[in-house]
Image (cartoon, rainbow, N blue to C red):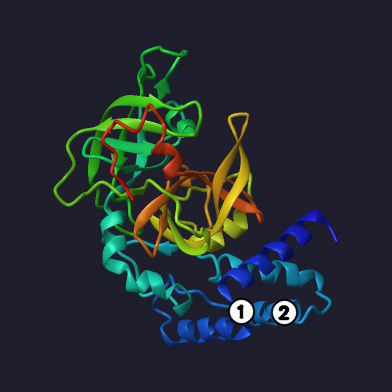
Amino acid sequence: MDERKRNLLAYIRKIQERDGITSDHLREMRVQKEEDASRRARPLVSDEGLSAWERFDKVESLREEDYFHLESVILQNGLRPAFDIQHDSYDVLPSLWQLLNDRRQAIQTLIRGIGRLDLIGHPTKRYVGTGFVCSDRLLITNRHVADEFVSHPGSGATLAFSPGITALLDLKQEVDLADSLVLEITAPVTILTTWDIALLEVRQLPAVVRPLPLASTPPQNLNARVAAVIGYPCLDPESDLLQQMQIFRNVFAKKRIMPGRLMGLVEATSYGRNVEALGHDCTTLGGNSGSAVIDVETGSVFGVHFAGHYLVSNYAVPTWELANESQIKDRGINFIR
């Protein structure tokens, strides 16, 4: 068995343990889809996927094609799906994600403060990632996202936009809708060297937008908590193109909510350093850099997504680590306990 197959089976087993998934759950998801075929965001488990899962669950020998179907069950068919956001909300989700249905009002408030970073004057890119408002005048994103339009020539040097390039944060850009709600980014504020994080200044927030609350202390237990990444997944030319097109219906760089679970603290590499990142298994693509990783139970941001290792873990900067950063802690960011 090659490494990809081993990783896939190990990843599925972990999801099965975290979610308590059984074949009955998959059958229920299939029934939900058939009862309401008009809801495009609802998952559909194929006969082949269900059969492959049952063989996997019984530890039976798997056919070559089973690995493909098992991978599809995780991604486009619902265990780690991506759902459209429209009008700052989302459809009623399958029972596996009932907590997101129950917490809809709180999540909607968060959705309104998350946007796509659009570039003006960049020679090759129209948009570069995700950011979210964290105070009345600041947004947060990844350092590697800000590097596309911010110059920081050295320690102590003044930050500035790269020559001829500026950026905007569009808080809409939803699937099938043309609405925009644009925040002008007026200046880069801080680029961290310890974490993949940047702060950018924006003009006054619209009345409907509130700074997202960032957790300043970790909870007692991080493992298996229901999480959601909200951001703008973009097509990744270095990954499986067909799979991405199936998951996102060939519609990219639009606002999605991607549920999953937290995986505790895991080691990751960031700018040549080993860091203790917050692990999660929500489905992400490149445009999700800078996305908010939300703890659904509390409605607060636990992390800022920055990278992933396919079929192993995705990684986020823990917000409580940022609360102790000297360059950040006195900036008026909406940290909560």
Q: Is residue 190 visible?
A: yes
Q: Position of residue 142 (x, y in %)?
A: 45, 36
**Residue drawn at (29%, 39%) of the image:** 333
Query: Which circle's residue, 2 or 1, is located before the other in the chain?
Result: 1
- Compared to 180, does 144 lie above or below? above
Q: How many marks?
A: 2
Indicate which label's residue lies in the foreground, 2 or 1: 2
Disc 2/disc 1 C-alpha distance (Å): 16 Å
* Residue 168 x/y as whole percent: 30, 35
Kindly state the secondary structure of the residue where label 2 is placed. Answer: helix
Residue flagged by tag 2: what amino acid is it? Answer: Asp
Residue on which disc 1 sits: 46
Q: Is residue 170 above or below residue 148?
A: below
Q: Locate residue 195 relative to residue 176 in the image: left or right.
A: right
At numbered mark 1, what does the secondary structure look like: helix, strand or loop? loop
As shown in the figure, which amino acid type bears the numbered disc 1? Answer: Ser
Q: Is 307 displayed left or right of 321 in the figure?
A: right
- Mark number displayed over residue 271: none
Q: Is residue 290 visible?
A: no
Residue under label 2, please give it.
Answer: 57
Q: Mark 1 and mark 2 in contact (Cβ < 8 Å)? A: no
Q: Position of residue 203 (x, y in %)?
A: 20, 33
**As drawn, 243 above or below 51:** above
Q: In front here: 201 or 265?
A: 265
Residue 219 appears at what percent x and percent y?
A: 45, 56
Residue at 55% across / 44% down in the picture?
277
Q: Residues within 10 Å of mark 1 (few under 14, many from 20)?
A: some
Q: Along the horizontal axis of the image, is 70 left or right of 125?
A: right
Res 263 → quadrant: bottom right
Outermost residue on the front side: it is 220
Along the viewing direction, whichever of 84 and 302 lies nearer the viewer:
302
